[in-house]
Image (cartoon, rainbow, N blue to C red):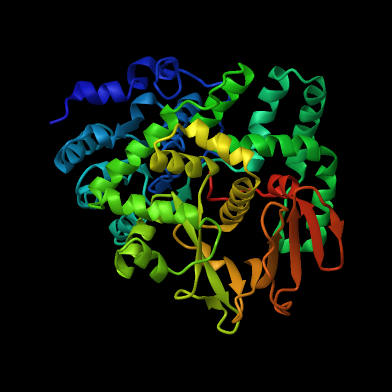
Amino acid sequence: MIKMTEIAEQNPWWHQGINFIHHDPHLAKIPAVFINRKIIPLEKENIYVISGPRLSGKSTYLKTIVKELIQNNTPAQQIYYLAAVSFTSRRELGNALQYFVDSNRDKPLFYILLDDITSVKGWDRELKAILDKGIIQNGLLVVTLSNASNIIKLAATFTEGSQKFINYYLKPICFREFVLQVSGHISKRLPDDQLGISLPALLTALPNCVLDFSRGIDQLDREASKLLNFRKELDLLLHYYLVCGGFPFVINSYLNNLINKNPVGIDPIAAEVFIRGLLGDLSKAQKQETTCRHLLKSLIERYGRRFSFSNLAREIEITHVTAIDYLQYLEDSFLEFIVYAYDFQKREPKLKGDKKIYFLDPFLITTIKSYLSAEPVWSMIGAAMDNPAPRAKMTEGIVLTHLLTNAEKPGSRLTRDFLWFYYDKTGKEMGNIISVDGLYWELDIKDPAVPAVKSPKKISRVPLCIRLTPDEYARTRNRVTVPISVFLALLSPSAQNL
């Protein structure tokens, strides 16, 4: 049974108040760039679910909520944080929750923050048993998850209650947020006087420039034109983003080493932590590491190219059902996502047609390559940056990831609902297709390093086209050609992406 002293150690603000931030393992050692996330509005009796991959900062986010609550005069004793990994059984978890609720029944409002609750076997049954006792009639619950499939379990747990179930994602930050949160730090420390002037100017301009697909192609043209004078700065920042991606720990490792001219740009521990977590999760889910390795190797080789699940399964000598099961698991773990082909006649994705796979973050690509090859992650990053073709494919993956985070709604609006690609009966392929308010847009990504793909005839149902290139800008009636770095800087995450 967990000891009350251990619970008190997890909640140091009970006796330290706001001073806990100076000793907390997540907040005390503030990195060079502390990545600020949107703080969700917390309301009584609601259940908030925050899901995202490892290293994205979920524990730090919960501690930030504690900090905000105390600074807003919430009594520290009414805030309860539990790292579920510290429990050995569901009974321990239930007892710990019941203790806090019993201690606060007379309070008008209390907060329960459960970190990585799925690490406790049978967590869903225990949580339901506690909720059935009216655990949050005077409070609210915030839960973090590392696997999106558990959202379904949570939803089922709450269906019989009166609570409101609200989903959020906490993923690697997008390029726009990277620019907004990193530029100030870089401008003060890199030995470039010009950057010291231009990056602050970019920070002034960017918040007022954002893409809204629902407002049409003219709005994109206007917003992009405002940032064209900053393309040099955005290109440099996109290079940095390609190297480190959007995980806060990796960003800080890279920037610190960049400024200090360390030849090893990213601490290898970041890749090691992620891979250890992946292997641990595979074991808990009763998945085979060997099968996963073969699958990841094939996905890296096919990155950004269309293929069928059947061919993939035959190549690595597993059944079609097993291939789908493992791919779904990796997608639920926020490692990769599947883009389906689209059928314009049926107006729905071709679930049995060819697919494409993209990883959620560029750092994940190089981390997986490091895992498969046993080479240091920094060597894999260097090889990718020095080779135009892999770099172009990584850039394409970033664009698709940003389109995903711009429009998705966890639990209700998934990738297949608005983002696809298209190929005709002859195999000719159109760029990616996005749907906004019933209107189709083509997104055509062009890079000299990637051989051009033969395109099908223009489809009348796709009237608008965004053409992304490294450096071109042009406008015709229904098409805008925009530099990739400018386009990415205009894309903000959806309201439910923190």
Residue at left offset 56%, top offset 27%: 254
Q: Quadrant of the N terminus?
A: top left
Q: Nearer the viewer, residue 18 or 439?
A: 439
What x and y, as percent, mark residue 362?
A: 54, 43
Residue 408 versus residue 13 in the image, above or below: below
Residue 342 against residue 257 in the figure, above or below: below
- Residue at the image point whose x is 35% and y is 56% from the top: 329
Q: In the figure, 23 relative to 161: above or below?
A: above
Q: Nearer the viewer, residue 400 or 356?
A: 356
Left or right of 360, for residue 213: right
In-image side of 429 versus 376 (left or right): right
- At horizontal 16% and vertical 29% (from top left) the residue drawn is 2
Which residue, as the protein is rendered here, is positioned at the far bottom? 345
Residue 74 coordinates in the image, percent (x, y): 44, 28
Asked whether residue 67 is in view, the answer is yes
Q: Is residue 436 visible?
A: no
**Which residue is most to the left?**
1
Residue at horizontal 79 percent and vertical 37 percent from the top: 232
Q: Is residue 277 left or right of residue 202?
A: left
Whole-percent x, y for residue 238 in the image: 67, 39
Quadrant in the picture for residue 43: top left
| Corner quadrant of residue 322 | bottom left
Count of numbered tags: 0
Name the spot of residue 110 as percent of width and height, x first: 36, 36
Please tell me whether residue 78 is drawn above or below residue 314 in the rendered image. Answer: above
